[in-house]
Amino acid sequence: MRFLAGLFLSSAVRSVVAVSFGLALMGCEKPDQARPGETWCSAGRSILVIDDSAVPDAVRDAVLASGSVLGTDDPEYSPSPPVVVIPFHLPGQAPNPNVTPAAIRDMFFDTGTGSITDYYLETSYGQFDIQEGGISGYVELPMNAADYGANQLGMDWTRSAEAARDILQGSTIDWASLDEDGDHTIAYPEAEIVFLYPGGGGGANRPSSVQITHAGQMYTISNSFVYLDSKTAEDTTSATNTIRYNIPVAIHEMNHGFFNLPDRYDMDVTGLGPTGLFDMQCEAYSIKHISMLDKIKIGWVMPKILSVVPDRPDSERHCYGFPASESVPAGLVLINPAHPEDMWVVENRFASASARNFDAGLPESGLAIWWYGSEAVPETYRLRLIDVSKGDLPPDEYRDQVAGALWKQRTGHPQDPATVTHLLFPLDGLFSFAVRGVGPSGQTMYAEF
């Protein structure tokens, strides 16, 4: 880790500095640093074997703290939550006959097929395994969309608690079997509930609490309901791709209910936001793993932590090897122990490492460097992807990232991190660290910190 004496920037400085270095400075004697004549690291110690035992417990706890995320340390977290799916349609609307229990089971619960179960098993490294909690027959609602949408924001009928109640009441789900504690309340993690509608569009997450009767008993269903579209009955492609086209949207919306992950898009436009096209919570129309920060906060990854201090000796600058995070729970956190609420998170995203192509929606492969800001920043903007192609900006100015954002060797590119040393630091200017010698993307990537 190289920290440049005299370049620790004051809180008044609001830009990130990039300094070009010649090959002489890239070469050094240590075998785990960039070698003489090389413009990037071609080897290095794996981040998996970094000894971070000296990191204070308080700092480690701050890094791992789930905060508003529903993580493994939360009593409401379940590693295998039941998912209930209820297909429904509005009056006068034809139900899609291809939305059968078998089709629903294929999309959500079958394994080895690229299902939602498969997605969560892969992105959690086998630690999150959803279960079939029930599949209902079709429910026909008694009122139309305009009636339900009256007095709702934007006339959005999916926001209506009455619509949710009517769907739940008309379903064939055995609610008593889901009531594990016998309190006549079905709340997460007793069930995650998906309403499947033949609208041909996207989806939404609508928290609500309603009462229904079941087997002569009153039940309160207090949950974060996912509204998800299948194709319409009239769609000529419905028979071959009835529901699966909407798996990315389903995962995005279910992430709200499972883990309380926030939306990271703004202006109601998917993909426009602080993590751009690289994050399921910002762009939900293509499949991709959730970010390393989210995996850490949920509790699926125990990252290695480099505690950044101003007097770290120059000799501690190293080339590190980053295994692909699609298949290995590997992340690196760089943190100032005096301000552990702010951190940098680094992971290697290599789409081909996904066994079932669950990073197919990633615009490119490469080293992802995320900035996670303090709690003073609104939740939508706390996580940002540092975009190497957009020049040297303070973290709060990065947004709407597309292909070209990730860090990797790009011969001849003016922002090639193999030949440029980038000094990165948080908005308060309390610490900085150098990133350079970033190698080509691959199953293992190397970079010098």
Image (spheres, rainbow, N blue to C red):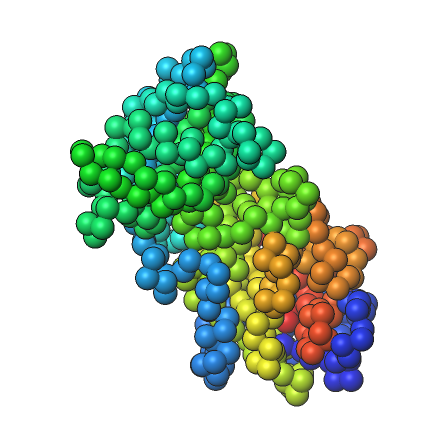
Q: Nearer the viewer, residue 340 or 286?
A: 340
**Residue 13 picture quarter:** bottom right
Q: Is residue 250 above or below residue 140?
A: below
Q: Residue 209, percent across and down?
A: 38, 44
Residue 352, can we see it? no
At x 50% / y 73%, what residue is drawn? 62
Q: Is residue 34 above or below residue 109?
A: below
Q: Residue 248, percent across and down?
A: 50, 37
Q: Could you tell me which quadrant the C terminus lies in?
A: bottom right
Q: Nearer the viewer, residue 78 or 37?
A: 78
At x 36% / y 65%, what residue is drawn? 73
**Residue 339 picture quarter:** bottom right
Q: Residue furthest front?
A: 151
Q: Is residue 436 left or right of residue 251?
A: right
Q: Nearer the viewer, residue 219 or 338?
A: 219
Q: Is residue 405 left or right of residue 174?
A: right
Residue 404, can we see it? yes
Q: Residue 277, percent across and down?
A: 63, 44
At x 32% / y 39%, what residue is drawn? 211
Q: Is residue 19 left or right of residue 271?
A: right
Q: Residue 436, percent across and down?
A: 70, 67
Q: Could you tell me which quadrant the N terminus lies in?
A: bottom right
Count the marks: how many? Answer: 0
At x 26% / y 28%, what residue is drawn? 172
